[in-house]
Image: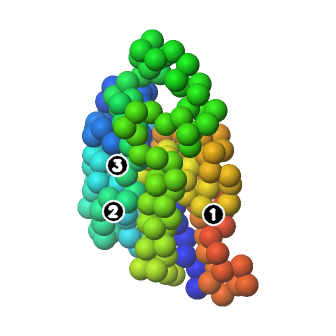
């Protein structure tokens, strides 16, 4: 019995690159094209699970309707909350609070943006979502439509990375990451199969 989990990051949202967090911007035309190109006519999944934010949920809904797959909305797979930085570009933040971005990247646990979700709490949220996923959908092929932070934290969970290094992982728009669990093997834990691979 094998459980396969594919995580795909949403495409480019309206407004381009910024610290979006839980701000609910939809996909841009380019973002829709990125997602459709990434998946093409493939749909090997038994179930599609999505973040409720529109940049994920709208594509997940289209895909589930086109291929007649079950669709589940999972709030635990929302992006990390960036607090006061939400909706701002890196340039905005550097202008308003010089040095804050550098401090955050150097120490994301202790130098979070004002009002942001603490990284250890985000870690617990994603671990909880993963445990729920593996309990409920054991032996199935699963697609999770989500965010860069969710994919980074999922990789941290699977690989046991130091939490403070999680932002060292690059996650492209519409990039796909695959995890697999072989429940018949002595290695009965999630393993990373590929990151930014193709279907």
Secondary element at image label 1: helix
Q: Which residue is mark 2?
A: 74
Q: Mark 1: few, some, or many residues within 10 Å (few <14, many ≥20)?
A: some
Give the CA separation, mark 3 to mark 1. 23 Å
Q: Which residue is mark 3?
A: 56
147 in relation to 46, above or below: above
Secondary element at image label 2: loop
Task: Say which residue appears at 55% left-offset and 58% top-offset.
Answer: 154
Image coordinates of residue 180 in percent, x first then y, are 61, 70
Q: Residue 108 or 176: which is nearer the viewer?
A: 108
Q: Mark 2: few, some, or many residues within 10 Å (few <14, many ≥20)?
A: some
Compared across the picture, whether 52 is left or right of 21 comes to: left
Secondary element at image label 3: helix
Which mark's residue is nearer the viewer, 2 or 3? Answer: 2
Q: Is residue 31 visible?
A: no
Kindly identify which numbered label has been placed on residue 158: 1
Kindly identify which numbered label has been placed on residue 45: none
Q: Is residue 148 visible?
A: yes
Which mark's residue is nearer the viewer, 3 or 1? Answer: 1
Pick whichever of labels 2 and 3 is earlier in the sequence: 3
């Amino acid at each position: 019995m094998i459980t396969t989990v594919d995580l795909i990051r949403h495409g480019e949202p309206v407004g381009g690159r910024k610290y979006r967090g839980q701000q609910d911007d939809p996909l841009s035309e380019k973002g829709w094209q990125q997602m459709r190109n990434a998946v093409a006519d493939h749909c090997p999944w038994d179930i599609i699970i999505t973040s409720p934010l529109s940049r994920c949920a709208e594509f997940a809904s289209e895909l589930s309707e086109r291929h007649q797959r079950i669709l589940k909305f999972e709030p635990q797979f929302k992006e990390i909350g960036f607090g006061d930085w939400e909706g701002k570009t890196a340039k905005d933040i550097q202008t308003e609070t010089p040095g804050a971005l550098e401090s955050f990247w150097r120490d994301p646990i202790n130098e979070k943006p004002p009002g942001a979700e603490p990284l250890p709490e985000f870690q617990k949220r994603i671990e909880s979502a993963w445990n729920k996923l593996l309990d409920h959908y054991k032996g199935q092929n699963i697609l999770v439509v989500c965010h860069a932070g969710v994919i980074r934290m999922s990789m941290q969970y699977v690989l046991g990375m130091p939490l403070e290094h999680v932002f060292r992982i690059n996650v492209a728009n519409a990039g796909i990451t695959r995890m697999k669990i072989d429940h018949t093997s002595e290695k009965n834990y999630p393993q990373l199969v590929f990151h930014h691979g193709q279907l």
